[in-house]
Image: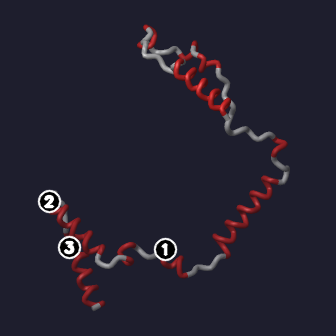
C-alpha cells in the first residue's frame, strides 16, 4: 500500500511539472494552419458504415422484401375494412372544435376590412353559421 502511494505521488509530481499547455505564443500561432502539411492530413479514417459485399446478403432477400411489402400494401389498401378511426379522419377541424370556424371568420373579416378587401363571402358564411346554430339549438 505504501509503495502504491509513493508511485502515485511521484506520477502526480511529474505530471505537474510537465504542463500540457503553453502560455507562450509562437509566431506561427497567429496564422492559419495549412491542412495538407498538418498531421491530420495523414490520418486515415475508418469507415463507419461499410458497404455490403454481395456475400453478405442471401440470394432470396430481395424477393422476400418485395413480397412482404406487396402483402402489406394489398392488405392495407384493398382488403382492410374501414372502422371508427377511419371515419374520424374524414372530419374537418371545424367539425371537431365547436366555434372555431366562426372565430376564424371573424378574424378574417377584421383583417380584410383593415386592408380594404372584399368581405361579402365572409359575411354570407357568418350568416349561414348563425342559421345552423339556431337549427341545432
Residue 136 place in picture, x, y as percent: 30, 90
Front of the two marks 1 and 3:
1
What is the x, y in percent for residue 44? 67, 24
Q: Give the structural element (helix, strand or loop) at label 3.
A: helix
Q: Earlier in the sequence, mark 1 or mark 3?
A: 1
Residue 127: image x %, image y %?
22, 79
Task: Please tell me which residue is depicted at 27% across the width and 86% down the height of the picture.
Answer: 133
Q: Residues within 10 Å of mark 2 (few under 14, many from 20)?
A: few
Q: Is residue 56 left or right of residue 94?
A: right
Location of residue 65 with respect to 23 vertically, above or below: below
Residue 124 located left or right of residue 94: left
Question: Is 46 rendered above or below residue 137?
Answer: above
Residue sitting at 51 percent across and 19 percent down?
Answer: 19
> In what element is the residue under mark 1?
helix
Camera-side residue: 40 or 90?
A: 40
User: Which residue lies most toward the front here?
Assistant: 2
Lower position in the chain sequence, tag 2 or tag 3: 2
Displayed quadrant of residue 77: bottom right
Picture quarter with the C terminus: bottom left
Identify residue for label 3: 123
Q: Label 3: how many residues lie within 10 Å, few (<14), some (14-19) or many (20+)?
A: some
The residue lying furthest to the top in this view is 27
Q: List the residue tagged with mark 1.
A: 89
Of the pair 9 and 112, the residue shown nearer to us: 9
Question: Which label sits on residue 114?
Answer: 2
Q: Nearer the viewer, mark 2 or mark 1?
A: 1
Amino acid at each position: 500500500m505504501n509503495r502504491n502511494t509513493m508511485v502515485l505521488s511521484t506520477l502526480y509530481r511529474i505530471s505537474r511539472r510537465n504542463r500540457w499547455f503553453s502560455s507562450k505564443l509562437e509566431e506561427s500561432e497567429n496564422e492559419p494552419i495549412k491542412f495538407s502539411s498538418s498531421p491530420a492530413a495523414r490520418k486515415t479514417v475508418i469507415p463507419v458504415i461499410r458497404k455490403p459485399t454481395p456475400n453478405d446478403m442471401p440470394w432470396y432477400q430481395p424477393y422476400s422484401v418485395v413480397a412482404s411489402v406487396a402483402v402489406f400494401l394489398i392488405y392495407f389498401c384493398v382488403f382492410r375494412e374501414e372502422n371508427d378511426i377511419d371515419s374520424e379522419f374524414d372530419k374537418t377541424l371545424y367539425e371537431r372544435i365547436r366555434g372555431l370556424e366562426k372565430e376564424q371568420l371573424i378574424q378574417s373579416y377584421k383583417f380584410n376590412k383593415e386592408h380594404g378587401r372584399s368581405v361579402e363571402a365572409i359575411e354570407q358564411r357568418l350568416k349561414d353559421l348563425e342559421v345552423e346554430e339556431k337549427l341545432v339549438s
